Every structure is written in C-alpha cells, then in structure tokens.
Image: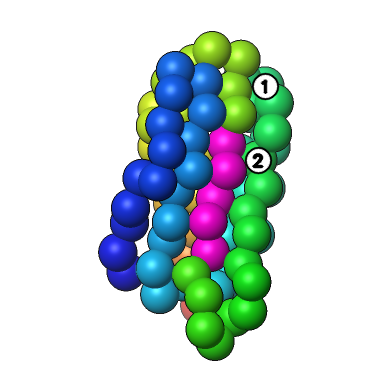
C-alpha cells in the first residue's frame, strides 16, 4: 500500500491509496462519516483493476489528517473487539 496526498487544505484532503479496493475504502468512509467533524467523506475509483482510489474528506475546520487518523484508530478498535468476541464464541 502506498499513500499520496494529492491536495490538502486546512479542512479538505484528497488522498490516493494505491493498491487498495472498495473493501478498505468503504470501511474508512463509514468510519469518517460517523465523526461529527466530517462534513463529506467519499472516494472515487475509476476502475478497480486499473486505477487507485482517491479518498476525499472535508471537515468542519479540523485538520483532515487528524480526522483520518482517528477514523483508522476506530476501525482498529472495532477489529480488536471483533477478534475478542469471536475468540470467546469459538472457545465456548
């Protein structure tokens, strides 16, 4: 995976995420939209096999880099919780 910030202002960012597909981008977009600081979170992928997705985030003025970091931390926490619950279920 490679990341490239295409464009960034105080409240907006376009981030190219090379090598990823809808799977990660949909989860990230959903996590971003759960954040009240986020006004817009979307991504564009021209074609899954020949283009890389570009994530667009617009915030209420909060640094979009911090907002994306927080969304990623939330996803990691959700995955950790799932692993714990799943492990308990299969060991029961």
Kindly report the distance in space between the C-alpha atoms of the residues bearing marks 2 and 1: 11 Å
Q: Nearer the viewer, residue 77 or 68?
A: 68
Residue 86: percent from left, percent from top: 55, 69
Upstream in the sequence, badge 2 or badge 1?
Answer: 1
Residue 42: percent from left, percent from top: 67, 47
Residue 83 horizontal side relative to residue 47, left or right: left
Task: Answer whether residue 87 is visible to the viewer in this image.
Answer: no
Q: Which image quarter: residue 73?
A: top left
Q: How many discs appear?
A: 2
Residue under the image location 53 percent in, 64 percent down:
53
**What is the magenta range?**
53-57
In this picture, is 70 found above or below 10?
below
Q: Quadrant of the C terminus?
A: bottom right
Badge 2 is on which residue?
A: 41
In the picture, the disc for residue 61 is none
Residue under the image location 46 percent in, 28 percent down:
64
Q: Mark 2 or mark 1, which is nearer to you?
A: 2
Task: Answer whether residue 52 is visible to the viewer in this image.
Answer: yes
Badge 1 is on which residue?
A: 36
Q: Residues within 10 Å of mark 2 (few under 14, many from 20)?
A: many
Residue 36 horizontal side relative to residue 21, left or right: right
In this picture, is 67 found above or below 43?
above
């Amino acid at each position: 995976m490679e990341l490239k910030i295409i464009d960034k202002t105080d409240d907006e960012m376009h981030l190219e995420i090379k090598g990823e597909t809808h799977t990660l981008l949909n989860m990230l977009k959903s996590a971003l939209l759960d954040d009240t600081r986020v006004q817009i979170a979307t991504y564009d992928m021209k074609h899954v096999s020949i283009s890389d997705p570009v994530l667009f985030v617009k915030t209420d003025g909060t640094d979009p880099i911090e907002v994306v970091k927080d969304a990623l931390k939330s996803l990691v926490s959700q995955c950790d919780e799932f692993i714990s619950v799943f492990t308990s279920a299969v060991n029961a």
